[in-house]
Image (cartoon, rainbow, N blue to C red):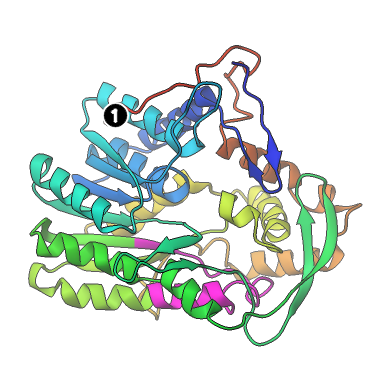
């Protein structure tokens, strides 16, 4: 079938298997170009199919020759219907890893559930014995709690008072003012339950209780802080409360791993185009302005560049892992540079529909968005028939 992007709001409902394969190949080639990293050799990535999770799996495998198990919740293809992009990404990753002689197996299902945790434990016991590194990179808007059976939904809202600021429809380039009403009722509690650290802790307890953590095992979860321009709706909003909980959880996990000298960290990463961030008001405008500045300065990074730097310059240097005053690893340091943020703030005051294409990198934003779904890659013939029925080797 000929596969073209089809949009529904901020989501693309199709994905291209060959484009997703090219995306994975490009990331592998980048990691290989940077040389080997003396990192972990047996790695579990929870949330492994897109974004930072996929980049972590690629960096572990092709930077450190690690055996990897990837957990994700993706839609498989059917006749005439494409899979979700994460499915095609994972298929391409496994094929490349096996071709390189690397162990790679995947589990598709709800990582919040007890069943998927047990399935993962059984696979680790059977194949790997113990794990050195656990990456926690889940990004789900809902969570069915495995103990209570309650379905919790996260919300993106300010706390206390309504928030009004500019945003952009990155498809049309139209800059408009948006107002978001403050949270109410159980919004904070639900958001923390979905996006906080409870499930990360559950995973680590399950692995520890099954004696699957190697001595000195490390676990890393990903977070974001962002600028003063976005803090009302992000870091000081409901999601910020969830991120606070996630970051506090790192300390409790580290305490629980004392017997094996294990460590838990939260890595604060850079603002990037993801399926989630594209739907957050204000963020697309901020990212388009940020990209313009960081690309001009030569400091722009995508997911794979961020994770390569995290591994090579933070986690696996042979020295103590550098953290900030709150115990967090910071690879958002180039984004949060004072001069960069001052430039973004100045451009923010000027940006409108007529000048955003010049002031910001709206075209770069759009390209990154379509890349998420396998579209817009050089070397892929999008006019040719593509086989949508691509399988993942380890998932039968």
Residue reaching furthest top?
A: 384
Report the side of 92 relative to 280 (left or right). left
Asked if 104 appears above or below 98 in the picture, the reply is below
Name the quadrant containing residue 229.
bottom right
Residue at the (25%, 49%) spot, across then down: 44
Q: Element at badge 1?
A: helix
Looking at the rendering, in which quadrant would you find the N terminus? Answer: top right
Residue at the (50%, 30%) spot, across then down: 20
Residue at the (31%, 64%) spot, across then down: 146
Question: Do we see residue 320 in this rendering?
Answer: no
* Along the line of sight, the residue nearer the viewer: 184 or 346: 184
Report the side of 236 relative to 361 (left or right). left
* Along the line of sight, the residue nearer the viewer: 338 or 287: 287
Residue 7 percent across, percent down from the top left? 70, 39
Q: Is residue 344 magenta?
A: no
Residue at the (40%, 32%) spot, across then down: 28
Residue 360 percent across, percent down from the top left? 77, 52
Asked if 255 appears above or below 149 in the picture, the reply is below
Question: Do we see residue 190 in this rendering?
Answer: yes
Looking at the rendering, in which quadrant would you find the C terminus? Answer: top left
* Along the line of sight, the residue nearer the viewer: 318 or 164: 164
Residue reaching furthest bottom?
A: 160
Asked if 55 appears above or below 4 in the picture, the reply is below
* Along the line of sight, the residue nearer the viewer: 253 or 314: 253
Residue 388 percent across, percent down from the top left? 50, 21
Residue 180 percent across, percent down from the top left? 73, 73
Report crowding for label 1: few under 14, some 14 to 19, many 20 or more residues within 10 A (C-alpha).
many
Residue on which disc 1 sits: 97
Q: Which residues are magenta?
A: 221-246
């Amino acid at each position: 079938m000929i596969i073209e992007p089809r949009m529904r709001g901020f989501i693309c409902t199709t994905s291209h298997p060959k484009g997703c394969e090219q995306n994975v190949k490009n990331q592998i080639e980048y990691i290989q170009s940077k040389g080997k990293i003396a990192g972990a050799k047996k790695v579990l990535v929870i949330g492994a199919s897109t974004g930072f999770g996929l980049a972590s799996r690629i960096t572990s495998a092709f930077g450190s020759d690690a055996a990897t198990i990837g957990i994700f919740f993706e839609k498989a293809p059917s006749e005439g219907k494409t899979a979700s992009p994460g499915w095609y990404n994972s298929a391409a990753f496994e094929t490349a890893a096996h071709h390189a002689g690397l162990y790679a197996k995947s589990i598709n299902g709800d990582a919040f559930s007890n069943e998927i945790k047990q399935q993962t434990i059984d696979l680790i016991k059977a194949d790997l014995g113990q794990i050195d590194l656990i990456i926690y990179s889940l990004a789900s808007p809902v969570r069915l709690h495995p103990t209570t059976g309650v379905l919790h939904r996260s919300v993106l809202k300010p706390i206390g008072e309504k928030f009004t600021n500019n945003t952009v429809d990155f498809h049309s380039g139209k800059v408009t003012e948006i107002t978001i009403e403050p949270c109410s009722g159980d919004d904070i509690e639900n958001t923390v339950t979905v996006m906080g650290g409870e499930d990360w802790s559950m995973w680590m307890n399950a692995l520890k209780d099954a004696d699957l953590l190697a001595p000195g095992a490390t676990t890393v979860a990903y977070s974001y802080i962002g600028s003063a321009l976005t803090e009302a709706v992000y870091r000081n909003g409901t999601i910020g409360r969830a991120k606070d909980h996630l970051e506090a959880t790192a300390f409790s996990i580290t305490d629980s791993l004392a017997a094996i000298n294990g460590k838990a960290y939260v890595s604060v990463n850079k603002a990037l185009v993801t399926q989630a961030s594209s739907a957050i008001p204000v963020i697309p405008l901020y990212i388009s302005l940020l990209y313009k500045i960081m690309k001009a300065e030569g400091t722009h990074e995508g997911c794979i560049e961020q994770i390569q730097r995290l591994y090579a310059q933070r986690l696996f240097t042979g020295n103590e892992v550098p953290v900030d005053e709150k115990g967090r690893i910071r690879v958002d340091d180039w984004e949060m540079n004072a001069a960069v943020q001052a430039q973004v703030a100045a451009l923010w005051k000027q940006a409108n529909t007529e000048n955003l294409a010049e002031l910001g990198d709206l075209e770069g934003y759009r390209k990154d968005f379509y890349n998420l779904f396998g579209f817009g890659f050089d070397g892929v013939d999008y006019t040719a028939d593509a086989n949508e029925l691509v399988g993942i080797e380890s998932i039968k």
